[in-house]
Image (cartoon, coloured by chain):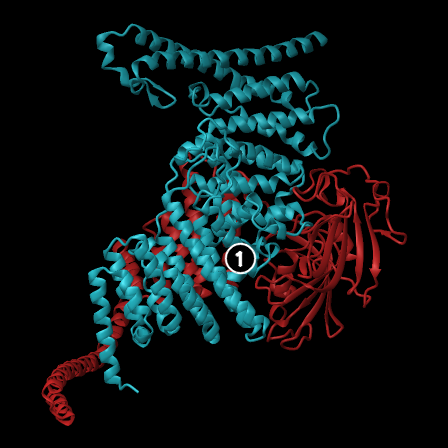
Chain colours: A red, B cyan
Amino acid sequence: MDLTEGDAEVPKVQEVLTELPSGAVSLSGDNGVYKFIRKEGTSEQKPSTGSKVTVDYTGKLEDGSVFDSSSGRKFTFNLGKSEVIKAWDLGVASMKRGEVCELYCHSKYAYGERGSPPKIPKNANLIFEVELHSWEAEDLTEDKDGGILREILNAGVDYTMPNNGAEVELELVGKHNDNVFDKRHITYNVSEADEELQLIPAIDIIVKQMKKSEHSRIFVKSKYGFGAAGSQKFNIPPNADLVYDIKLVKFENAAEAWEMTDEERLENSSIVKEKGTKFFKDKKYLKAMVQYKKILDYLEHHDAKEDQTELLENWKKMKMAGYLNLALCYNKLKDYAETIHMCEQALKEDPKSEKALYRMGEAYFEQKMFDEARKHFLEVIKINPNNKPARNMKAKCDQTIKKLKDAERSKYKGMFDKFSKQDEEAEIRKKVEQQKERAKAKAAKKVAKTDESGEPAEAVNDGMKNGIAEAQS
Amino acid sequence: MESVDENSGNTLNFMSQVKQIIKEGNISQLKNFCSDKENEEQVICSSLDLVSCFMDYLKDHEANDQDMENFRYLFSHISYISNEKELILGFLEQFDPMVEFDIINCLFPGLKIVCAKIMERDKANQTYHLNMVFSSFVYYAESLNLPKYDNYDPMEEYPERAEELKLAKFMKKCTEVGRSMLEIIQQQFQQKEIHKNHIKAVNCEFFNLCIGLLERLSRLNLEELTCTESAEKLIGKKSKDQNSVSQGPHAEPRLVLKTASDVCSLLHSLHRPWTMHCNMTWKNLISSDRKLSQEEFDRLELARGCYLYLIFDKGHGIDLFPQMDHPLFSFKQCIPGILSLLKQQDSVMLHKGLALCRYASNRLDPLTIHNRYLTNALKETNWHKPVSSLFQSAIHISTHCPSKTLRQRSGQFIVRFLDKFVWTDRYNILYSLITNAQHPGMVGYLIGYFKDKLSEILQQQMPIGSSYFLERSHHIIKISVALKEGSETDLLSEYNRLMSSLNMLRFLFIRDKNNKTQIWNIQASIEEQFLEPLRTGINLSRMHFRDELKKQSHPRKEEVSNETEFSICGTNLSTFPLMERKQALESAIHSFDMLENISIRVQEIIDQHRSTIEELM
């Protein structure tokens, strides 16, 4: 496996795979994977690491028995992401569009000593016939909207990637319509970049998905770039798509909670809280949220004993601040469901928190759940009768509820009148139907009698008509 | 042509005749009457009334098999000839939790026909109809009782429970109806009668049905029944030859397994297993444009966990799974499903989670996982700390689960899983687990693992990458030998941890002569803060227990009333039966002796070392 620490012995694939076709080329330094091209590709382009490639394949054991095949149902995977065995990541990366090749894989580049029961035995060398159909660049956005596409030029090292708050050193070159507008070597903290740096939002998203020494080309849609405003400094027009070449030179991740003592966790929480508040004041709510979330991350659990009352008190206060500030941010971003969730969490810590109840009330109010909102403002007033904003909001709720009720009353009043009219009509119609039935029954009886007595049919019909007329009257 | 009035009159007449026949309880006559060609028009006009009328009869009477069969025929007949758009509503409103499954079961042949007709004739509204049908199915499935698996143990065989059978039958019918509709839609798509986008929306409805069914399946025992003698006894089935030995695995798989297989195959008709085993696919398929609620998310993950268990542990559709997947990638994809199963209370679900865990992690070689890789790779899911969550769940199971088998399996998983991590992560995880695990038995178990790893490192050839582990090992040693309450520590509650710590110390003081672990740097503090208070604690506790043993052996009247004072591991001695009290006290004293023996041995090794150094000086 590629993640093993230390180097294992070099496989001698040629010794094992004796029937390699002439012209097969080695793809790995240790001759663990060979490729033999059956059909040349139709273009010179090759997929880059991270691309979503589509292939057709047939897999065979050395004795020629087929253990798997896509059978014409194209198979798609992300190249170079260790989604498939190492031989495939190497082999497919070397292919051109439309190429058909055979990959001869030493077991070390496949399933190794364990094999993959029941189809692939231990230490089995595998042969795959692969046809590369097409590929798409890797989409780095959360919504997969194609807003940030990455083409890896040089894969990085290690598996660690920068976290929020990590100090990163970048080399970046920004281009718009092939003109370089930005060429810099910068150092900053992820998700905490200063305004002066003029970094587009995409940079934070990209950097968190890069490895050390990785060099990538990024295609950024305006939504993740300078947006509708453009950039005066860089002379970028509104709604411009950009291309960046970014190299992550090095980075140092922000400390994780488990690496700290309780005191350190509290200290760091206080630092990030300050940072968050600064962002909040600048109305950068998303950035503020990143900081406040860190507080909750740091304070998830502690090692303190029950008698360390001061520490526990501070712990609780800080955690409350985290929840309440996050609730405030969500409220500003109009994500009311999350606001309520955060307040609920805060109330678990302190069921009488005025702020939590008030913010929850606000969120309900915005969601037009006025009864719920009123209930929460009332709770606040119960706890602190002098809380003026809560009083105002309660009054606002009362007014709105009254207005709604009035509106409903007038609306339904008309509706009820209509319904009662309809009911009356239906009642009359029902009666008419019943009379009709009765008349029909009478008529039928008469027919029966006429059949016996020989009375003319018109008379029966008349009788029926009379019956219906009677019923209608 | 008949006038409207005449028609309604005929219908009323027809219905009153039907009611009369039903009142007489003559269902065969009812069948003949309704299927009479002459009454066809009346049947069509009153199809909805007929369905509810028949259902009312079935609800009020215990129909025999023949009558049931007749009703099934009648529902099918009505479905063939009536308007499907109206009739489907009549059928679906019967999927009421108050209606018994046997009665609902009667509706399926008719419903299948109606659904097929509606798919063929109302292409524009297929998604709407599917949503209506499938939500009724899932709603009813959720209302059916789940079997209670008290003291479930995966090593034991259980006969199919009535509730299990009922659910399995119902779900099987649902998949049959679903499949028949899917076949029609696929045919229409092949013939280009419907658009690609339409297929996407349709797939989403089928996917929702599968999620609903898989979620139910996750709560059922899906183990195969090998018909051993004990199992036969449980089922109450006797072999023809009473003396014959069991003939290996039972030929007929349980219905619930067949149903599970059907659900998987329905899902695979929509999406390939490779796509389905990826985390994000499920989220995107169920809702690409909105955030899922926690409840929806939990349901989805549980269904996914059950699906992966069926694929990987039970092998349903494994043939369709591509054979070039990277084991680590597959493991990563399994983690959210595993976690959602492991956080449940029910042993049946825990078993599924552990089985999936075993499958996925067994494919990995040791030293192949980086904690950060997994954490980064699973950022998109709701699991922000997948590794620590997985360990915490496993620890919870191995310390709290009522099933011994599951406790053992979970314990084994913890150490095997730890072995999959690189040395740096092994150290960090172990440190965090020993610090946070509340259960002394578990802490002892982890200290034992720590000792084994040090043993590997202290070999002549040190494993590559293990220097990080070795350099920091003294931190773990320190927390392992901490006596938080000094000599007043409850030695019996902490017995496992203390024994493991002492064993580790003995091992290290003997093996690590070159002080690679830095144990000799902290030797003085180990003596002062651990061994000395421990010995004091042992002496005090032993005296205390011996006194009590004397009292129990020769009880005096005035002391009997005072017996509530003494407790062992938090359990009041008076709650023990009289005969067991003495035994418990003796066993406790024996434990103290064991602790003392080994602590003395550790002290001897230290003293020997000290005297050797003094001699050298």
Badge 1: residue crowd in 10 Å (few <14, some 14–19, many ≥20): many
Q: Nearer the viewer, residue B600 or B191?
A: B191
Residue B151 occupies which quadrant of the picture? top left
Tell me the residue at 60%/67% (across/down): A145
Residue A151 occupies which quadrant of the picture? bottom right
Tell me the residue at 30%/69% (across/down): B34
**Relative to B85, does residue A82 appear above or below in the rendering?**
above
**Relative to B426, does residue B539 appear above or below in the rendering?**
above
Q: Is residue B164 visible?
A: yes
The residue identified by callout 1 is B267
Report the number of numbered marks. Answer: 1
Q: Is residue A425 left or right of residue A242?
A: left
Q: Is residue B95 visible?
A: no
In the rendered structure, the residue with mark 1 lies on which chain?
A: B
- Residue B438 on image: x %, y %: 46, 32
- Furthest residue toward top: B554
Could you tell me which quadrant the C terminus of chain B lies in?
top right
Could you tell me which quadrant the N terminus of chain B lies in?
bottom left
**Relative to A120, does residue A49 appear above or below in the rendering?**
below
Q: Nearer the viewer, residue B405 or B251?
A: B251
Check disc 1 and report its element: helix, strand or loop: helix
Please, what is the three-letter code of the amino acid marked with disc 1? Leu
Q: Is residue A88 left or right of residue B21?
A: right
- Residue A239 on image: x %, y %: 63, 76
Q: Is residue A259 left or right of residue A381?
A: right
- Residue B457 on image: x %, y %: 69, 27
Q: Is residue B172 left or right of residue B29?
A: right
Tell me the residue at 44%/30% (across/down): B230
- Residue A53 on image: x %, y %: 70, 61
